[in-house]
Image (spheres, helix red, strand yellow):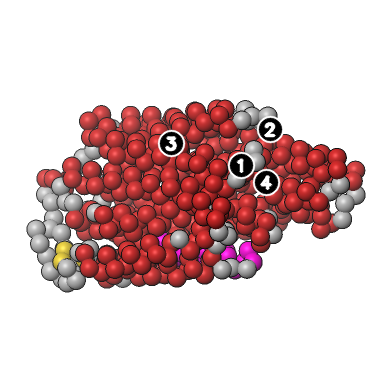
């Protein structure tokens, strides 16, 4: 359990350690707001697109070997990210990191579900697994802030390397192997359709503020992405070796839990993307100060996630998950009134509510997904669970970030009209708040102060629009949970538990 959690920690740490480095990346690599979204989302797109196929690789070839390969790829690409010299290089290295993460995350969960066969033991273990994800989210901003206070922005990636080395040695020596003896061949066409469809859809959303929401390039790309995703569904329904078992969605418990998971992470990751920039650019906190102020979200999440497993067993899945998601919606609603005059302590209650809400929803949703699939399909089940996390997070960053950028760009374009600035300066100001503050720092006297104030006002206005949209999305998710997700879990594995295929280096050896 400890080794699986260490392996998972390196992936969950990366979800938030990067957020506090975004302003430094803007300054060092001259990255625009859309560049920042791609630095975050390229990783998530590749991660989500390959989760299912690499989860099935684990079922077929052995989950231990896929976990080891993922740790090697993740560690080496983290080192490449640390020394990137341009936004494009960083985005490419982040894509390779997504490949490694897609091998690590489902392998840890599928190995866990094969080691802990009893339903109650599995529920507790998943609570610890979920808490580890919360730990990564919790320490990420603080670790990132400390590293940035003492080193350069690349250190937030380089920190992954020693963790990966420790995990590789421990997994090789300690972790048992397991696989599905009846696993089918990997569905590569399905992986290509899903990854390309998600990537094109998110590209359209992210680039819309720059290209224009009604531009032919954006609408055409989004339409092609939707067509590819529709083709993926049709292919999966007809394939004899599907990447995603569409029959699993006949279970209301599985469908409701996967949907709820995606929507609550939509809010969490989209919110963290906004809040870290707000705290640094608008309120003026350093990277370390920002990390410490974001940490309460994840610390509360980490504490509540294991407790939620207990509540799930004694109260039921529906009330726990619905309550958690309702708290997330309330948190966003509290943040819709943020202004440039607001202080951190006005946002603090919302941050706490968000941590409690996500913590309540996370572990019960994970247990509902894993409890709905046969034991020998644990790899596909865990990959589907992880894919819902990454797709929800990537969509949250894309949608909320694009809403913010659209309003920011529109307001700044209007403000700059009387000044007749050069195209390059106007583009830098309109591309991001960081760019505008860099120009303001070089502007003479009162003009610099006016520009910085106007840019911060436009940013906060865009953030208010984004969190209003997030409130609506998460509130709708509460209704979905109430309507679709069954309350009490069904434990077929207790009634007729199949044998786990486990061994120490021998995937063919079984033990009951």
- In this view, the mark in front (3 or 4): 3
* Residue at screen point 52% across, 31% down: 348
* Residue at screen point 36% across, 51% down: 385
Mark 1 or mark 4, earlier in chain: 1
- In this view, the mark in front (1 or 4): 1
Mark 2 or mark 1, earlier in chain: 1
- In this view, the mark in front (3 or 1): 1
In the picture, the disc for residue 340 is: 2
Residue 255 in view in this figure = no
Q: Is residue 380 above or below residue 308?
A: below
Q: Residues within 10 Å of mark 1 (few under 14, many from 20)?
A: some
**Element marked by disc 2:** loop
**Element marked by disc 3:** helix
Is the Cβ of the residue at disc 2 closer than 8 Å to that at disc 1?
A: no
Q: Position of residue 167 (x, y in %)?
A: 32, 63
Q: CA distance from mark 1 to mark 4?
A: 21 Å
* Residue at screen point 15% across, 59% down: 500
- Residue that badge 4 annotates: 405
Mark 3 or mark 2, earlier in chain: 2
Q: Is residue 501 above or below residue 293?
A: below
Question: Which quadrant would residue 101 be assigned to in this image?
Answer: bottom left
């Amino acid at each position: 359990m400890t080794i699986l959690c260490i392996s998972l920690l390196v992936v969950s740490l990366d979800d938030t350690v990067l957020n506090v480095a975004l302003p430094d990346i803007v300054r060092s690599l001259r990255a625009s707001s859309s560049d920042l979204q791609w630095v975050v989302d390229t990783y998530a797109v590749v991660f989500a697109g390959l989760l299912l196929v690499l989860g099935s690789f684990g079922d077929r070839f052995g989950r231990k070997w896929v976990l080891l390969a993922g740790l090697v790829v993740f560690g080496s690409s983290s080192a490449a990210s640390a020394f990137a010299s341009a936004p494009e290089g960083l985005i490419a290295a982040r894509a390779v990191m997504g490949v490694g993460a897609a091998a690590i995350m489902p392998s840890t969960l599928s190995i866990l579900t094969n080691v802990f066969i009893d339903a109650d033991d599995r529920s507790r273990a998943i609570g610890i697994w979920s808490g580890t994800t919360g730990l990564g989210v919790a320490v990420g901003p603080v670790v990132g802030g400390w590293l940035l206070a003492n080193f350069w922005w690349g250190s937030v990636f380089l920190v992954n390397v020693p963790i990966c080395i420790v995990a590789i040695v421990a997994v090789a020596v300690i972790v048992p192997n397991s696989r599905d003896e009846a696993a089918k061949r990997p569905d590569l066409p399905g992986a290509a359709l899903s990854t390309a469809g998600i990537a094109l859809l998110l590209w359209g959303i992210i680039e819309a503020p720059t290209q224009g929401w009604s531009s032919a390039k954006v609408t055409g790309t989004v339409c092609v992405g939707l067509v590819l995703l529709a083709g993926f569904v049709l292919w999966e329904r007809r394939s004899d070796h599907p990447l995603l078992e569409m029959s699993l969605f006949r279970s209301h418990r599985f469908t409701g839990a996967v949907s709820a998971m995606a929507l609550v992470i939509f809010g969490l990751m989209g919110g963290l993307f906004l809040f870290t920039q707000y705290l640094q650019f608008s309120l003026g906190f350093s990277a370390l100060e920002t990390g410490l102020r974001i940490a309460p979200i994840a610390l509360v999440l980490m504490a509540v996630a294991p407790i939620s497993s207990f509540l799930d067993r004694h109260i039921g899945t529906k009330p726990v998950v619905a309550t958690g998601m309702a708290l997330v919606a309330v948190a966003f609603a509290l943040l819709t009134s943020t202004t440039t005059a607001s202080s951190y302590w006005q946002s603090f209650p919302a941050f706490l509510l968000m941590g409690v809400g996500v913590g309540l929803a996370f572990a019960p949703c994970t247990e509902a997904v894993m409890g709905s699939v046969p034991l020998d399909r644990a790899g596909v089940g865990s990959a589907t669970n992880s894919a819902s996390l990454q797709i929800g997070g990537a969509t949250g960053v894309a949608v909320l970030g694009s809403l913010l950028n659209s309003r920011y760009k529109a307001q700044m374009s209007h403000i700059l009209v009387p000044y007749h600035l050069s195209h390059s300066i106007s583009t830098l100001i309109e591309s991001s708040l960081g760019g505008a503050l860099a120009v303001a720092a070089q502007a003479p006297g009162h003009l610099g102060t006016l520009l910085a104030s106007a840019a911060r006002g436009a940013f906060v206005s865009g953030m208010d629009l984004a969190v209003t949209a997030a409130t609506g999305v998460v509130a709708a998710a509460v209704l979905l949970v109430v309507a679709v997700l069954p309350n009490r879990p069904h434990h077929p594995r207790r009634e007729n538990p199949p044998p786990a295929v486990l061994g120490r280096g021998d995937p063919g050896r079984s033990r009951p």
